[in-house]
Image: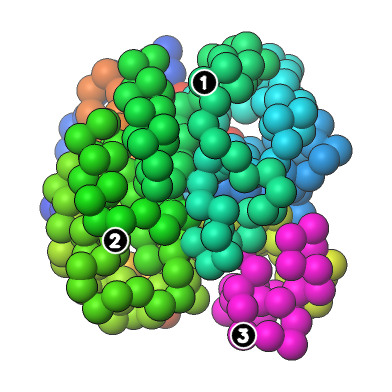
Amino acid sequence: MTKVTGRDLRTGKSIEVAIENGRIAKIQESADAAPLWISAGFIDLQVNGYAGHDLNEEAITPETVFAVAEALVSTGVTTFLPTLITQSQQRLVHALRMIKAARERYPLVAQMVPGVHMEGPYISPEDGPRGAHPRESVRMPDFEEVAEWQQASGNLITLVTLSPHTEDHIKFIGQLRSVGIHVAIGHTHCTPAQIQAAAEAGAELSTHLGNGIAATLPRHPNILWEQLAEDRLTATFIADGHHLPPATLRSMLRVKSVERSVLISDAVSLAGMPPGQYRAAVGGDVLLEKDGRLSIVGTPFLAGAALPLRSGISRAVRVAGITWPDSIQMATKNPARYADRRGELVSGAEADIVLFDILDSGELEIGSTWLRGSLQFERT
């Protein structure tokens, strides 16, 4: 039996987590004064790449997926959804085959990757809402394509982000839900009425709310207000300090509430890399700054997100008035609903655990990461 001890965020008391066969067998108070805080492992629903490894590159291999997984463990992430953006069907099918092969080849990937997030290709074709997704690959919904995705991946498609701007898209939501695939609204120019229709059809999430949307909107009504007010939609947020200004993040979290909010990284391949100028597949010449801002050189435009989920957790606490337990919940229990995980420290749950320190700066520093009760990372 393995035992992991840490301080409970809600009570401040030390607890001992006993682990058997990769699952939590028992939790009890500990007399030992634990130096680090303890939590369920972080769950990231949107990862495009990390540490120089790009899940959307044409030459993706099983080793690419393994390298991303191995790097994310050191950031406290124990579960993530590799996220494929809008591409040709040929490239999407190839990437899905590589993810499947990675799960078969590497136990670490099999444990960390329960599914795949398809961000596109059924999104808005319009400039602005489309974001960095290539216009030439945006297309209408096709359930036969989804069947091909599932065959290539071994039924890994877990989440699809789409734009419900036509009746065909809204009907498609029902088709996806009928086979157990979660649906998120994102990269859209649809109407408020179509937001309601999408929720009625079974959409459950708003992908990176406040981003992937037109730069200017009608004062009211608009699709931002509609998604904020729609209780059937849980919102995901990129809390990196660059995609949403502090007041915007604070207001959105207050409206959606902790229960209907999820923190994501939306990390691209340059996340976790040293500051500097790089040549990126999306954006061309880009500048990665010390604070994690990634922008197209010579412009004010962002070129993606470049901070790990742990940074979003700590930032939500610092700028949005969220407590540490609530911020951790938005990166564990809440996203677990869409990733086939428990995301809690409770008996019977998978023993995915992170121990961390909270620095004087307010940043979160990972001490160790446990996956199914096995120590995968320890800070030296």
Whether residue 318 can be seen here? no
Crowd around label 2: few <14 · some 14–19 · many ≥20 (10 Å): many
Image x and y of residue 179, in percent: 39, 15
As rendered, which of 233 and 146 lies closer to the eye?
146
Q: Which quarter of the figure has residue 326? A: bottom left
> Circle 1 — which element?
helix
As rendered, which of 285 and 40 lies closer to the eye?
285
Badge 2 is on which residue?
Answer: 223
The segment highlighted magenta reads 280-304
For residue 244, side relative to residue 9 (left or right): right
Whether residue 131 can be seen here? yes
Residue at image x 38%, y 66%? 210
Q: Amino acid at mark 2?
A: Ile
Image x and y of residue 166, in percent: 40, 42
**Label at residue 143:** 1
**Label at residue 300:** 3
